[in-house]
Amino acid sequence: MGKRDTSFDSRYAMQVAARAAAAIFGGYALAAMTTAALARWLPLSRVEAVMTAMLSSFAIYATVAIVAFAVSRWWRIWLYLAIVGVPLGLALAFIGRRVAS
Amino acid sequence: MKGGLRQSMAWLHTWTGLLVGWLLLAIFMTGTSAYFQDEITRWMQPEIHGERDPVAAAEGIVARLGEHEPGAASWSMMLPGKRAIATTAYWQDADSGRGSWRDNSFTVDGTGHRVEARGTLGGFFLYRMHFDLHYLPVMWARWIVGFCAMFMLVAIISGVITHKKIFTDFFTLRLGKGQRSWLDAHNLSAVLALPFHAMITYTGLVTLASMYMPWGVAAVYKDRAEYFADAFGIETTPERSGVAASMAPIGEMIRKAREQWHGADPGYIDISIPGDANATVRMMRGGGEAMGARGQTLIFDAATGHLHTPPAEKGAAFETESVMVGLHAGRYAPIALRWFYFLCGLGGTAMVATGLVLWTSKRRLQLPDPERPHIGFRLVERLNIATIAGLPVGIATHFLANRLLPSTMADRADWEVHCLFIAWGAVLLYGCLRRVRRAWVETLTLAAAAFLAVPIVNAITTDRGLWSSLREGDLVFVGFDLAMLALSATFGYIAWKVHRRPAVPVRKPRASREVAA
């Protein structure tokens, strides 16, 4: 992080908080939605799809956390989360659960 | 973030590692001990001798419970794996809700006879502390541990991205160079066992995945019960018929199960409504019998010994999960691989510890006034002492308490555990009162002394001291005592190194230009 003087830099603190919130809460939300989507739409038996989704979820969570701190501007991670998350959320809300077991 | 990708990742690595570092250290340390859980249990129950024999144990338990608890709702037993001897039996009273674990359980040895061993949780306590912590509701603890594991995963990934010279660092350890040496030690312990660290963190999350990530189940099932029925088969509790029937020999059922499992032993057996004509016997394959941790469950009719049709083979994803959990717990590992697991675990513990020390050693040079560091720096310094020296003191005290608390003491097993936390808390307080350097030297010396005391107290209070174990070729007791001596020597050596180190770190002109870690 290099040297920083000891006075409190509120703009810096805010952007760290924005990234951390995206990583912790945004990451969990996206992992949860992806897990639900994979469980619902993977072409596997229902129980296998659920397990496959669950096993992948932590990799998705970790990826979001890394990207949250890798992007050059703090709001970009929120933009990316919205681009992926909103359509996914809509699909989960409006395309029903699968019938096949 | 400021600077390029590598700087951002270095920053992320530093802070994810620091925030959960102390808890991670405790998780790594107790988890590492759990690879020798069975051996620790054997050491903590010195009254139990002999060889294991699951069939004799199961027969002895069924005979004993048949005599004393014929009307129970269920009988169950945790059979010993290959490295253990004792079996714990438990019964549930018919009017369930009554009868605690303590009142309703007993221990038998390899011959199936009840033994009066001292009240202890054995190695099981440190294993459970690894993910259930203590003095906290279990669900909270597991969420906290999962949160730490997720930080750890992010710290590993960002640590690898930060690293320019991952291969060179494999061979680099410059000793006696202050901050540079801590960085080298941190890199070495991290890079050397990197596949282990990545595996252990991810598979650790997987062990509790259905709790952390229930959203897949929620998306396709009515409720969790429906999912579990789909995943593990429907197991209905049998109805009482009211007709009494004696039980077919349990040994014969175990032999059938072994046949079904290509020779593997059951690890857990429970018998529902024993003595009734409708009673059933459930057997789960032992955890250490194959790489996959989740073994098959077989069901028998208790009265006839007839084996129900075994459940279908698992699908690929479930098999993967089973192997991931198996890889994490390492129950399948034979002795050489087990030691390798243990060393990797120690490497992980060292990685977290050196990372925590590196944080202070890096920043001490940049403090405006090294004599009066700011509150955050002081907090990290003291917490480092409390966990790196304090938890080992606590664990050694836990072992000492096992030998020193009177065997008739009420709630003895609980007090063994309280002793761990009392000693740990005492070191935390002590470390805050002394000057930092003195605190390090003294608490590390205390850890060395406490571990040294374990084999000595063992030799005094039991007839299974190091000499007699050596004479009898009892490798478990020899191994435990030697491990204590090795830990004592390690802490003693570190204390001596800290004591001899020059009081004021030499400020090097290039120090501030070094890459953050």
Image (cartoon, coloured by chain):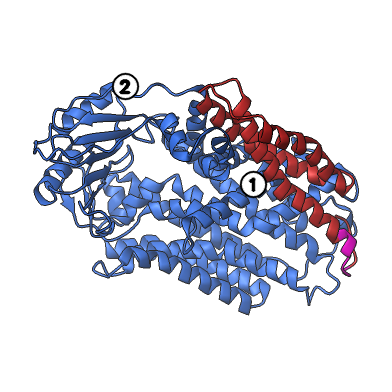
Chain colours: A red, B blue
Chain ID, mark 2: B
Proximity of marks 1 and 2: CB atoms separated by less than 8 Å? no
Residue at image x 69%, y 53%?
Answer: B17
Q: Is residue B393 toward the left or the right of residue B91 in the image? A: right
Q: Is residue B359 toward the left or the right of residue B135 in the image? A: right
Tag 2: residue type?
His
Chain ID, mark 1: B
Secondary structure type for disc 2: loop
Q: Position of residue B387 (x, y in %)?
A: 58, 63
Tag 1: residue type?
Met
Check residue A10 for magenta coloring: yes
Magenta stretch: give its range.
Answer: A6-12
Residue at image x 45%, y 44%?
Answer: B35
Q: Residues within 10 Å of mark 2 (few under 14, many from 20)?
A: few
Q: Position of residue B48 (x, y in %)?
A: 23, 51
User: Residue B158's quadrant in the figure?
Assistant: top right
Secondary structure type for disc 1: helix
The residue indicated by pointer 2 is B262
Mark yes or no: residue B477 visible: yes
Mark yes or no: residue B172 visible: no
Q: Nearer the viewer, residue B244 or B402?
A: B244
Q: Earlier in the sequence, mark 1 or mark 2?
A: 1
Q: Is residue A65 toward the left or the right of residue B194 in the image? A: right
Return the mark for residue B150. 1
Q: Nearer the viewer, residue B182 or B486?
A: B182
Q: Nearer the viewer, residue B515 or B500?
A: B515
Check residue B508 for magenta coloring: no
Q: Position of residue B399 (x, y in %)?
A: 39, 61
Q: Nearer the viewer, mark 1 or mark 2?
A: 1
Q: Nearer the viewer, residue B277 or B417?
A: B277
User: Residue B509's quadrant in the figure?
Assistant: bottom right
Q: Residues within 10 Å of mark 1 (few under 14, many from 20)?
A: many
